[in-house]
Image (spheres, rainbow, N blue to C red):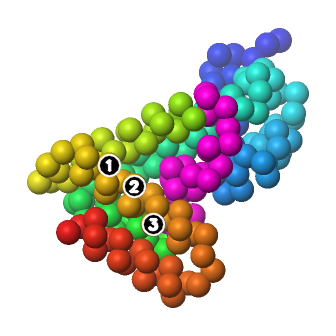
């Protein structure tokens, strides 16, 4: 007896959720298909019922992580633009305790991937810029300004994660918050 369409969708969503978590935490090269499937509570054989390759999974996992981040951004933006910035540029986000934005967590990993993955990352970045622009209650003067703020936010998280001086990382995030909110 085969799996129902609903069961297949749940399995696929479970695999994507596991992959998004593992890839944003450990990067492409440090996560294998077996790792993803074990984390999802499934066997490797089930992987190929849903994906043709690890690269395809990676691209879709980036989008899944982005959708999760987007939902968090929207909830934060409902509280206010400054709240969104505070949440994104927080030590909690830096540590990946509640969520991991794939734009910041995978920045150095993406440029070594195939066009499908890079296209997904590009699409996610464009969506993030649009979200920043929409979240600002005073509407930014241009897409250029939204891009500048988005890149400052992404870069701040990425760099703060790369350094091992906790105090300096906190200063860096605070400085970037001030710049984005100015």
Q: Residue 88 in the image: x percent, y percent?
A: 40, 62
Query: Could you tell which of marks 3 and 2 lies nearer the N-terminus?
Result: 2
Is residue 102 visible in the rendered structure shown here?
yes
Left/right placement of residue 104 relative to residue 9 reads left
Is residue 134 visible in the rendered structure shown here?
no
Q: Which residue is drawn at 63% across and 80% down?
A: 164
Q: Which residue, given by chain and number where applicable, does mark 2 sit on?
A: 151
Crowding near pointer 2: few (<14 within 10 Å), some, many (20+)? some
Kindly indicate whether the residue at mark 1 contacts the one at mark 2 (C-beta within 8 angstroms).
Answer: yes
**Distance Cα–Cα, label 1 vs label 3:** 14 Å
**Distance Cα–Cα, label 2 vs label 1:** 6 Å
Left/right placement of residue 43 relative to residue 22 reads right
Query: Could you tell which of marks 1 and 3 lies nearer the N-terminus?
Result: 1
**Distance Cα–Cα, label 3 vs label 2:** 8 Å
Report the span colored magenta.
Answer: 93-117
Q: Which residue, given by chain and number where applicable, does mark 1 sit on?
A: 147
Q: Residue 28 in the image: x percent, y percent?
A: 73, 46
Left/right placement of residue 53 relative to residue 113 reads right
As rendered, which of 58 and 147 lies closer to the eye?
147
User: Does residue 101 show up magenta in the picture?
Assistant: yes
Q: Which residue, given by chain and number where applicable, does mark 3 sit on?
A: 156
Q: Residue 52 in the image: x percent, y percent?
A: 76, 22
Kindly indicate whether the residue at mark 3 contacts the one at mark 1 (C-beta within 8 angstroms).
Answer: no
């Amino acid at each position: 007896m085969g799996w129902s369409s609903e069961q297949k969708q749940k399995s696929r969503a479970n695999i994507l959720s596991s992959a998004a978590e593992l890839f944003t935490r450990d990067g492409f090269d440090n996560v294998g298909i077996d790792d993803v499937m074990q984390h999802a509570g499934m066997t490797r054989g089930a992987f190929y019922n849903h994906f043709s390759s690890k690269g395809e999974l990676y691209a879709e996992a980036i989008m899944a992580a982005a959708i999760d981040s987007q939902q968090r951004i929207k909830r934060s933006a409902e509280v206010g633009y400054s709240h969104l910035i505070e949440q994104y540029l927080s030590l909690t986000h830096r540590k990946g305790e509640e969520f991991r934005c794939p734009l910041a967590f995978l920045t150095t990993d993406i440029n070594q991937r195939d066009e499908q993955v890079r296209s997904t990352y590009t699409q996610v970045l464009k969506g993030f810029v649009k979200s920043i622009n929409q979240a600002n209650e005073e509407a930014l003067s241009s897409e250029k300004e939204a891009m500048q703020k988005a890149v400052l936010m992404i870069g701040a998280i990425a760099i703060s994660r790369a350094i091992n001086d906790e105090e300096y990382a906190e200063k860096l995030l605070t400085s970037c918050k001030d710049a984005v909110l100015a």
